[in-house]
C-alpha cells in the first residue's frame, strides 16, 4: 500500500504553501486523491518525493539527511496526534494506556507489566527523573538478552521499562495489586491515594502524551536505533533528551505559573512571567497554531477534580491570555492544571510524560530498525 500524505504534509515536504501545491495539481504535476476521513486531499509520497527531486535538479540537498516515513503517528492541525489512524483524543476517552501502547506497538493487548526487582533505589531523596534514569539503567543490566531486537523482545523490554519507571516514582502503596493498571499505579505514587486522581484522568494523560511524531526525544531514540543500540540504551537517550526544560520540563514551568497566580493574582502572575521570561509557559505550540486538542481533552477530565476556586482561576488565566493575543494553551498547561489542582508534585507533568512516552519511543525504535542502519549523518559547515 502506497504511503499517502495529507495536504499540509505534502506542502511541508515540498517547502511550498498549500495554494502552490494545488497549483501543481492544476498544472498536472501532481495527482490529488480524496481523503476518506477528513476534508481535503491526499498525495502519493513517491510522487511528492519525485517532484522534490526534480525541483532540486536531481541533486541531494545538504540539509536533507534522511526522509523519515512513519506509520506511528500523524499530526493533524485540528485533531492533534493520530496514532495508527486513531485520533488520540478519542482514544483518551475510551482506552487504557496499555491498550494504546499495544496499538502503537502493533502487538496484542496482553503481556506482563510487572517491574523487575531492582532492589532499593540508592537515590531515594533525589529528583524523580534521576530515579527513573537509575531504574532504566538497571532494567537493561538485569535483562540477560537485552540485545534481542526482535519486535516481541522490544515490546517486552518497553513494558518492563515503563513499569520500572512507574515504581520508582514513589513507594508502593499497601495492598496494591501486582496486575493493577499503570494509570492507577502511577496515580497512587503521585498522590496519597489512587482515588485522588481517578484512573480515567491519569489514563487520559498517559494516552495523550504517548507519542507526538518526531519530537526531539523521539529523534534521539531513532538515532540510537539507527546504530542498533539495544532498547534500553535507546530509551535512555530519549529520557536524557526529555530532561531538558524546553521539552519534558515545560509543564513544571506552567505549574509554577499557576502557583504564583493563586498567590499573587492572575494579572500580576502573567505580567511578571512575561517580563521575566518573555513568554507564558503552557501557551503556544510550534505545530498547533490554532490550539492544541490535547489541552481541551485533558482539561475536560482534570477540571472536575479542581476546587471551584481553582477551576475559576484556571479559566481566568486562559481568558486573560487570549484577550491579549497570547497563543492558545497547550498540553503542558493541562498537565500542570491536573498536577497542581490535585496536590501532585510540581514535576508530575514530566513524570507522566516520561512514563507515557516509553510507548511512542518503543514504536519508533522498532520502526527505525526496519530502515538501513547509520542513515543519519550530518555534515558541518567549517568556519574559523
Image (cartoon, rainbow, N blue to C red):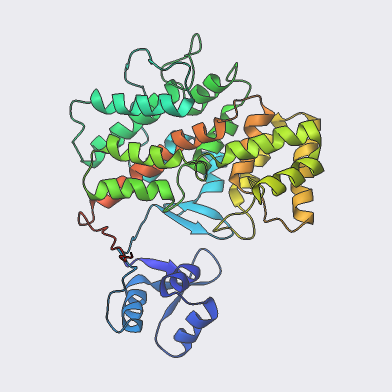
Residue 106 appears in the picture as rendered: no
**Direction top: furthest residue:** 174
Residue at 36% x, 24% y: name it: 135
Image x and y of residue 170, in percent = 49, 18
**Direction front: furthest residue:** 384
Residue 317 location, quadrant: top right
Name the image quarter holding the C terminus. bottom left
Residue 234 location, quadrant: top left
Image x and y of residue 71, in percent = 36, 56
Image x and y of residue 95, in percent = 50, 38
Q: Is residue 166 left or right of residue 227?
A: right
Q: Is residue 274 above or below residue 14?
A: above
| Front residue of this view, candidates 118 and 100 | 118
Residue at 37% x, 75% y: name it: 48
Residue 203 appears in the picture as rendered: yes
Number of numbered discs visible in the structure rendering: 0
Residue at 48% x, 77% y: name it: 16
Residue 260 location, quadrant: top right
Q: Is residue 137 above or below residue 119?
A: below
Image x and y of residue 116, in percent = 32, 20
Residue at 29% x, 34% y: name it: 232
Name the image quarter holding the N terminus. bottom left
Q: Is residue 288 left or right of residue 237?
A: right
Amino acid at each position: 500500500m502506497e504511503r499517502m500524505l495529507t495536504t499540509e504534509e505534502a506542502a511541508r515536504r515540498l517547502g511550498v504553501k498549500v495554494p502552490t501545491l494545488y497549483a501543481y495539481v492544476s498544472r498536472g504535476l501532481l495527482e490529488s486523491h480524496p481523503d476518506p476521513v477528513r476534508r481535503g486531499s491526499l498525495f502519493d509520497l513517491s510522487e511528492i518525493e519525485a517532484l522534490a527531486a526534480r525541483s532540486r535538479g536531481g541533486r541531494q540537498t545538504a540539509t536533507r539527511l534522511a526522509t523519515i516515513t512513519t506509520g506511528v503517528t500523524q499530526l493533524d492541525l485540528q485533531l492533534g496526534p493520530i496514532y495508527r489512524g486513531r485520533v488520540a483524543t478519542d482514544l483518551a476517552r475510551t482506552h487504557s494506556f496499555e491498550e494504546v501502547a499495544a496499538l502503537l506497538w502493533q502487538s496484542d493487548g496482553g503481556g506482563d507489566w510487572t517491574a523487575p526487582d531492582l532492589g532499593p533505589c540508592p537515590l531515594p531523596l533525589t529528583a524523580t527523573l534521576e530515579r527513573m534514569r537509575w531504574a532504566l539503567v538497571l532494567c537493561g543490566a538485569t535483562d540477560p538478552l537485552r540485545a534481542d531486537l526482535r519486535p516481541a523482545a522490544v515490546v517486552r523490554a518497553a513494558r518492563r521499562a515503563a513499569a520500572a519507571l512507574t515504581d520508582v516514582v514513589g513507594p508502593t502503596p499497601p495492598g496494591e495489586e501486582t496486575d493493577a493498571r499503570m494509570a492507577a499505579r502511577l496515580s497512587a505514587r503521585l498522590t496519597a491515594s489512587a482515588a485522588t486522581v481517578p484512573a480515567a484522568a491519569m489514563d487520559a494523560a498517559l494516552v495523550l502524551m504517548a507519542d507526538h511524531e518526531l519530537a526531539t526525544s523521539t529523534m534521539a531514540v531513532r538515532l540510537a536505533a539507527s546504530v542498533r543500540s539495544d532498547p534500553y540504551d535507546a530509551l535512555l537517550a530519549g529520557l536524557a533528551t526529555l530532561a531538558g526544560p524546553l521539552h519534558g520540563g515545560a509543564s513544571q514551568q506552567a505549574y509554577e505559573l499557576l502557583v504564583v497566580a493563586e498567590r499573587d493574582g492572575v494579572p500580576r502572575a502573567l505580567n511578571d512571567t512575561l517580563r521575566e521570561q518573555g513568554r507564558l509557559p503552557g501557551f503556544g505550540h510550534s505545530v498547533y497554531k490554532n490550539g492544541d486538542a490535547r489541552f481541551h481533552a485533558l482539561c475536560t477530565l482534570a477540571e472536575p477534580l479542581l476546587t471551584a476556586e481553582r477551576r475559576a482561576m484556571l479559566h481566568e488565566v486562559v481568558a486573560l491570555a487570549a484577550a491579549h493575543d497570547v497563543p492558545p494553551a497547550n498540553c503542558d498547561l493541562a498537565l500542570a492544571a491536573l498536577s497542581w489542582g490535585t496536590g501532585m508534585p510540581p514535576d508530575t507533568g514530566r513524570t507522566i510524560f516520561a512514563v507515557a512516552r516509553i510507548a511512542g519511543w518503543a514504536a519508533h525504535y522498532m520502526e527505525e530498525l526496519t530502515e538501513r542502519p547509520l542513515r543519519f549523518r550530518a555534515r558541518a559547515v567549517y568556519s574559523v
